Amino acid sequence: MEQLSRYDVAKYQGVLMVVVESDLLPPDPAVVVIPLLPDYPAVKLLNPGIEVDGTHLVLATRLIAAVRRASLQRVGNVAEQGDQITRAVDVLMAGV
């Protein structure tokens, strides 16, 4: 099982994903992720721009999903942008 932490960026079937699941949860074969897409229509606060290795991508928050850890390959981390990511999930869940 791939060792992944919150805000890690991982590749899944050619698409970059950011892990949004808390590190406090017990290990599970699946992990909650949000895709990072180059041309996703952005809504203020819901879809922040995220920089990954100098590439600008959009957090496609409404496409949140759980995928098998074994299907992911860690390629980086965006913890420095964690506040924007957490705010986007809050907007998705609570509308604020």
Image: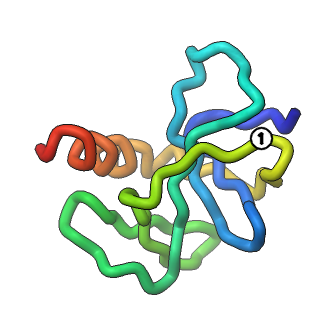
Work out whether 5 lies above or below 39. above
Q: Nearer the viewer, residue 64 or 86?
A: 64
Work out whether 70 lies above or below 42. above
Which quadrant: the N terminus? top right
Q: Quadrant of residue 83?
A: top left
**Which residue is found at the position 49% from the left and 74% from the top?**
57
**Which residue is found at the position 45% from the left and 65% from the top?**
50
Q: Nearer the viewer, residue 94 or 54?
A: 94
Which quadrant: the C terminus? top left
Q: Position of residue 35 (x, y in %)?
A: 54, 62
- Mark 1 is on which residue type? Arg
Q: Quadrant of residue 13?
A: bottom right
Q: Position of residue 75 (x, y in %)?
A: 76, 57
* Side of 79 where 2 appears, left or right: right
**Which residue is found at the position 29% from the left and 75% from the top?**
42
Q: Position of residue 3 (x, y in %)?
A: 80, 33
* Side of 66 where 39 appears, left or right: left
Q: Nearer the viewer, residue 91 or 7?
A: 91
Residue assigned mark 1: 69
